[in-house]
Image: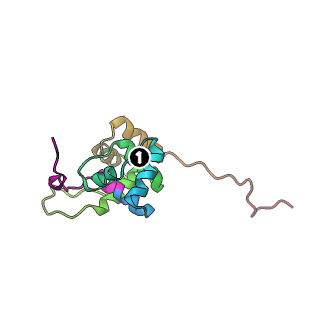
Amino acid sequence: MVRNHALAPRTRTESGDALLYARNRLKLTQNDFSLRLSAVLGRRVDTTQVAKWERGAHVPRSAVVMAAAQLAGLSVAQLVADGQSLAPETTASPAPKRTDLEDPRDQLLALVDLGFTLAQAITLVQRDRAPKPAKSAVGWKGAQSP
């Protein structure tokens, strides 16, 4: 069966918006973004896949969203929240979505909505909330011994 791509749905998804946000943040073309994703994922990602994810024709796997977040230097929760700013405004939406994602429960729900398993979502939220290691004063030139 041949699928007519002109008739494919043009609705965008949260995960597609997140990928588009990551690509725009990095100032990359879809081709360059697909090459970078390929390097991180260890498998080939085609430019057409990126285009389909961004326009919502296909939903990317959770590993792709995590790789995009890694490339953009953001947590997955930040990427999802920032990607939601690209979503078109619709008058028929049932309820406005929160985009702050400060509450870990909201982060979990957003990640599960993106297709992550609950276990993956919990791991990501815990990793993002873990305290960052303190920077060592070793090698700092501001404090010199007499």
Q: Circle 1: is it few (<14), some (14-19), or many (20+) Cα within 10 Å?
A: many
Name the amino acid, label 1.
Met
Q: Secondary structure at mark 1?
A: helix
Q: Is residue 84 visible?
A: yes
Q: Magenta stretch: residue 73 in it?
A: no
What residue lies at 64% left-to-right and 53% top-to-bottom?
135
Q: Quadrant of the C terminus?
A: bottom right
How far across and how far down the image is residue 105, in percent? 33, 45
* Quarter of the N terminus within the rendering: top left
> What residue is at 19 percent from the left and 52 percent from the top?
5
Residue 53: give x, y in percent of width and height.
29, 51
**Residue 57 left/right relative to 49:** left
Q: Which residues are magenta?
A: 1-19
Residue drawn at x 37%, y 41% as measured from the top left: 121
**Residue position for label 1:** 66
Can you name the residue that lies furthest to the top here?
A: 119
Pick the front one: 136 or 93? 93
Looking at the picture, how far across and down is residue 83, in whole percent? 33, 58
In the rendered image, which quarter is residue 142 located in? bottom right
Locate residue 123 relative to residue 2 in the image: left or right.
right
Give the residue furthest to the left.
92
In this orientation, does residue 100 appear?
A: no
